[in-house]
Image (cartoon, helix red, strand yellow):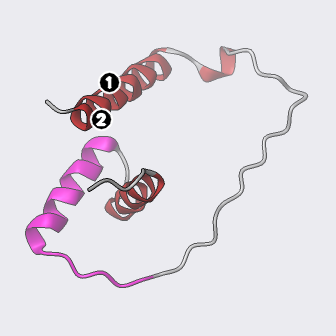
Amino acid sequence: MNAKARAAESALTDLDKLAEYFDRTDAGELPWDEESEVVIERPELEQISLRLPKEDLLNLKRRASRLGVGHTTLIRMLLHQYLRSPLTR
């Protein structure tokens, strides 16, 4: 297994641990800092058309379902992750 695959597997493991924690924990009982105000800025989105092979789309939908997100959200997440990583040859 290469370094990228190990990092991806580790990230999913960490995400799984976090999901398990919140499955067992009532978020209403956690200590929240009432004084801080959280502002979430949503980036402006632009609609595009994308043609994919049927098999790729089916695989995307399956993976998205396992992660609990929509397939278009997963595509956005993957593109964002790819664009933030350094280019390698």
The image quarter in which residue 29 lies: top right
- Picture residue at 47% right of the left edge, 53% below the top: 84
Q: Is residue 86 above or below residue 7?
A: below
Disc 1/disc 2 C-alpha distance (Å): 9 Å
Q: Name the residue under label 2.
A: 8
Quadrant of the image for the N terminus?
top left
Q: Is residue 14 shown left or right of residue 8? A: right
* Image coordinates for residue 38, horizontal then vertical, percent: 78, 41
The amino acid type of the residue labelled 2 equals Ala
- Picture residue at 86% right of the left edge, 26% below the top: 34
Q: Is residue 53 shown left or right of residue 23? A: left
Q: Is residue 11 shown left or right of residue 4? A: right
Count of marks placed on residues: 2
Q: Is residue 85 shown left or right of residue 60? A: right
Whether 59 is among the magenta residues is yes
Query: Magenta span: helix, strand or loop, mainly?
Result: helix
Q: Give the range drawn in magenta.
A: 48-67
Q: In this view, does 57 lie above or below 36?
A: below
Tell me the crowding category of disc 1: few under 14, some 14 to 19, or many 20 or more residues within 10 angstroms, Cα based: few
Q: Looking at the picture, tell me which residue is in the foreground, 70 or 11.
A: 11
Quadrant of the image for the C terminus?
bottom left
Of all residues, the one furthest to the bottom in this rendering is 49
Mark 1 vs 2, N-terminal side: 2
The amino acid type of the residue labelled 1 equals Thr
Q: In this view, does 39 lie above or below 60?
A: above
Q: Which of marks 1 and 2 is in front?
A: 2
Tell me the crowding category of disc 2: few under 14, some 14 to 19, or many 20 or more residues within 10 angstroms, Cα based: few
- Picture residue at 67% right of the left edge, 21% below the top: 28
Q: Name the residue under label 1.
A: 13
